[in-house]
Structures are given as C-alpha cells and as structure tokens.
Amino acid sequence: MKKIIISGGGTGGHIYPAIAIANALKAIDPTIQILFVGALGKMEMEKVPRAGYEIIGLPIAGIKRELSVDNISFPFKLTRSLLKARSIIKSFKPDIAIGVGGFASGPLLIIASLMGIPTLIQEQNSYAGVTNKLLAKRAKAICVAYPNMDAFFPKSKLKLTGNPVRNDILSVSHKREQAYAHFGLQPNHKTLLIIGGSLGAKTINESIEAGLKMIIDSSYQVLWQTGKPYFERAKAAISALKTPYAQAFDFIYEMDLAYALADVVVSRAGALSVSELCLVEKPAILVPFPYASEDHQTKNAMSLVEQNAALLVKDKNAGEELVQTALRLLQDADKQHELSKNIKKLAKPNAAKEIAETVLKLC
C-alpha cells in the first residue's frame, strides 16, 4: 500500500488543489493512504477534515514583510516545525511527499528530501513562490499551471499540467435551476457572482457595498461571498435595501452551484480562481490583490487579459470602476460570449489526474 503526504495550505488557493490531487490519487488507487500536513491555526485544519482526510498541523508561520514582533519568533517556529516534520515522516513512512505551497510545505519537503524521500512540487501561479523556488533544487518533479516557468525552475523537471480543481465544478451547466433554489435567488434575473477569495477582499467588498443599490436597480441580482471579516456589513447592506435579489455568505462551499447561476463573475486573480473560471467558462472581471508576493495575481490576470479572455480592474481603481464595469458587461451579451469562448480555450480539465499519475510514477 502506497503512503503519500500532501503538505501546504494557508488559503483556499493551496488547499483545494491539494484535496483535488488527493481525490485523483484515490480514484486511481483506493488503497493509497494519504496524510495532509498543514499549518496550525490556518484554514486547512478545518477544510481538509471536511473533505475526509486526516491532517496534522505544524507550528510554522510566515515572515511578515513589515517590521513585526512576530518575526522574532520565526526561527523558533521553524525549528519546531522541522523537528515535528521529521517525527511525522518517521512515523508515517511516506513513499513520496507533495508540496502545494504555503507555510507548511517548506519544513515538510525539506525534511523529506533530506531523508531520501522523493518530493513533487505543485506551483499554482504564473510567478513562482519563494518556498517552491527553494524546494525546487531537491524536487524530482514540478507540476506547473503556466508556460515559461523555466524562468524559475529547472526545465528538465517541469510538467505543464494546469491547476487541479474540485471535480464538482467540471460540469455546472445543468445545475442552474438547482442553484437558484439553493441560494434563494430568482431565475428571471441575471446574476453577478462576487468571489473575494477564501479570506475575503476588502476593496471588492467595499466597492460592491457602495454600488449594490445601483446593481439591484438595474434589475440584476448579486451572489456575494464576503469572507468572514466583512460578512455582517454585507448582510446589513442587503437588509437595508429590503431586496430578495441579493444574498451574502461568508464562505460558499457549493461553488459548483455558485458558478452555475453566475452570468458574470467578479474575482481576485488567485491561481485557483483563474483555473476554475477557465473550466466553468464564465465571463470574468479580475481584481488582482496588489500585495500578493511578486504581484503574482496581476501576472495571473494578465495571462487571461492578453488573450481577451477576461477583463481587469486594478485594485486601486475598484471603487470608481468595478461596479460600472460589471454593469456594462452584464448588459453586453456579445462581450460575455466572446470572453467565455476565449477563456474556455485555456482550461485544463485533467490537471489533477495528470499530477496524480506523475506522483505514482515517482513512487
């Protein structure tokens, strides 16, 4: 029986590809034993067990870019995490360790490679993260979602697979009626779906709040994932309008249904979001998070914009431009069709299966 560790997390953009890889491995060989390793206190500690997998947390945390007292404790947390990673590997005895990015993948994959266990990296973004660049030297294979990643990694190790996504979003077109019923929205109104990422997005949320009445008055409706910090404000804004044409959720687990009823999507440009939008073929307005490392979200977004597969609104301009851009796109069926057609060409629906097959070959 093969044993596999999957390590990483911090955001949904790391966690859901990891779960998709685990599911693909199980689909190929149900006897495979999979253990996740995440960072204590991060969302993977909740999301992974919900998906049916065991997870162990490391006390690791990232280094803050600004001066912070928290940075003083980083060496201690790193040392404790390396020691715990060694203990986990000695106990579990994996055949391979997979890193999907995020704090926890660093200590786990470093120790695994030093103990002679093959490692595989899955890099979701068009600009490689610091952790993955450090781990690449010892990795046996690096699965990437974008071309030209030899700028960051050894070309001989690269495999262009795309980003793995949840199986349930691979086919959403037949779920539209179910989606209206699930979210309590109306079939006779076009829907604007707002996704700020798993942790929410302040600029997007504030822009939608300010323009919510304008959207509703234009006979459109809103399905709004706010993230926990903004949820109560969004609920209050909807309540003040006394409208049945807007629903807010702090987190949407049923993203297949959310995509099914969306006519236009507003989203951050994290790697997972971009990959999902390609697969569901939705016209999208991307608002990249400008403080992501190396501004990788803008690079992700531009990979679509340059092929006329999405629109872009800069974060700093969202307050003035986002709602107006969304309304123009909702009113323009031809532009919606054009964006959908072009974004579909960039989809890679077999990413999880290809990564799983690569993992098993390395075993």
Image (cartoon, rainbow, N blue to C red):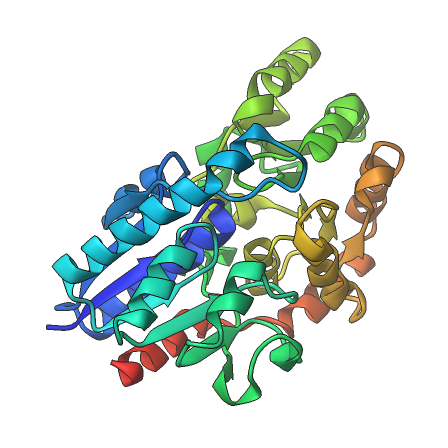
Please report the residue visible at 80 percent of the width from the left and 67 percent of the height from the top: 308
Residue in front for this viewpoint, 237 or 72: 72
Residue 5 is at least partly visible in this image:
yes
Q: Nearer the viewer, residue 344 or 318?
A: 318
Q: Quadrant of residue 214?
A: top right
Residue 349 to residue 234: above or below: below
Of residues 57 and 256, the one drawn nearer to the viewer in this rendering: 57
Residue displayed at 81% across by 35% down:
323
**Residue at the spot 39% in from the left edge and 81% down from the top edge:** 140
Q: Position of residue 137 (x, y in %)?
A: 48, 77
Q: Can you give x and y, in whole percent of width and height, for residue 95 in the image? A: 21, 73
Tag count in the figure?
Answer: 0
The answer to whether 141 appears left or right of 27 in the picture is: right
Position of residue 320 relative to residue 147, above or below, is: above
Q: Quadrant of residue 182?
A: top left
Question: In this view, which residue lies farthest toward the bottom?
Answer: 156
